[in-house]
Amino acid sequence: MTCLLRRLLASLATLLVAAHAHAHEVGWMQIQIAGTTPDAPTTTVALYYPTMAAPRAIAMGPFALDVAIGGKPVDKVKALILLSHGISGTELGHSTLAQALARNGYLVAALRHPGDNYQDRSLLEKGPERYFDERPRQASRVIDAILANPAWKDRIATDSQGPRVGALGHSAGGYTVLALAGAKPDLSRMRKHCQTEASEDPIFCGIGRSGDATPPLPAIAPSLKDERVRAIVAMAPTGVLLTAESLAAVRPATMIYVAELDRFLVPRFHSEWVASNLPAPNLHRVPNAWHFAFMNTPSMSIPSHDGDIAANPPGFDRDAFLKQLAVEIAAFFDKTLL
């Protein structure tokens, strides 16, 4: 084979790979999932999925999407990825990551957590015990609904273990997906932490009066683990309340991201604690990053307990980081779910 022919074949292979990687556009639709009781709130879920329909740039509140609203889904998707936002967040806040996964062939179900979103903060007001118990249950109910939905259940790839399911979460959403993977909360850990380390972790311990005399979970608490979830990515997760024993027993493939300048959830108490106790530590450090680096940059200033969500440390390029993060997360799910 001549050198020229080898180069031509190599170039052709590269073009084929690139074409395959960008074979899909992103479809988007919003669905409502009924509550568990007639008076319970519905759960709003944004679905990002692969389609052949042409997308367009759309502003939805302070976030911009590049999607084909209502575009016809492809016949098969690689897996279902549950996406859980952080405290008081939105199903639109991680659209760069969701869109990248959809282009890569995944169905992403980004829920708006009932009682813990930008419109409704009532869940936290009911106390930490209810908050940390209900969030993973809300996520599991979304998985239930998607896997039972006639429009989607047959599109999600299956194997001998059943439907392929992963989960992705940020902040309180990072806690949520860790709980789905089998990590167990112990509120007495949080209480002790905020009694002794409040000055070192002031934002976390100040939210929802976390340092108050919080009752521990029952000795035999109902499990929050969802056996269907095979791989998770937790970005700057709330982690101090998770027990070392339960983290050591986590079996789904896990990737943890830490923002090195995180003031909202100080890494040594949260992300680093989680990673150090997992059976296979997989910690990725993001230099010069604040807590909200994992979210899309909103088009307007949005205040938080840690300042403006749209702000970045000097020299930090959030857009470039999110593009690289999307590549890494898609590769992780390709490796662990397929």
Image: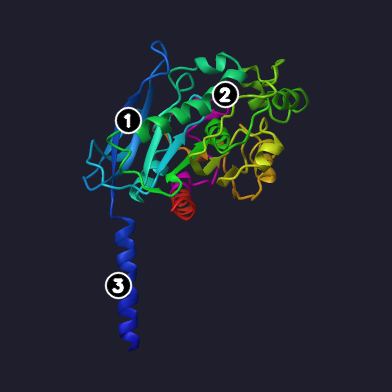
Residue 60 circle label: 1
Q: Residue 64: give x, y in percent of width and height.
A: 34, 36
Eye-nearest disc, 3 or 1 = 3
Check disc 2 and report the residue beneath it: 133
Towards the viewer: 71 or 57: 71
Towards the viewer: 36 or 44: 36
Span of residues in magenta: 301-323
Left or right: where 93 falls relative to 186: left
Task: Classify mark 1: residues with Cα within 10 Å, few (<14), some (14-19) or many (20+).
Answer: few
Label 3 sits on a secondary structure element that is helix
In three-dimensional space, the C-alpha distance between marks 3 and 1, rounded to whole angstroms, equals 39 Å
At 45% from the left and 21% from the top, the residue drawn is 114
At 49% from the left and 22% from the top, the residue drawn is 116
206 inside magenta stretch: no
322 inside magenta stretch: yes
Check disc 3 and report the residue beneath it: 12
Q: Residue 296: give x, y in percent of width and height.
A: 43, 38
Q: Eyeballing the image, is 96 above or below 7?
A: above
At 63% from the left and 40% from the top, the residue drawn is 271
Label 1 sits on a secondary structure element that is strand
Q: Residue 100: give x, y in percent of width and height.
A: 38, 47
In this orientation, does residue 122 appear? yes
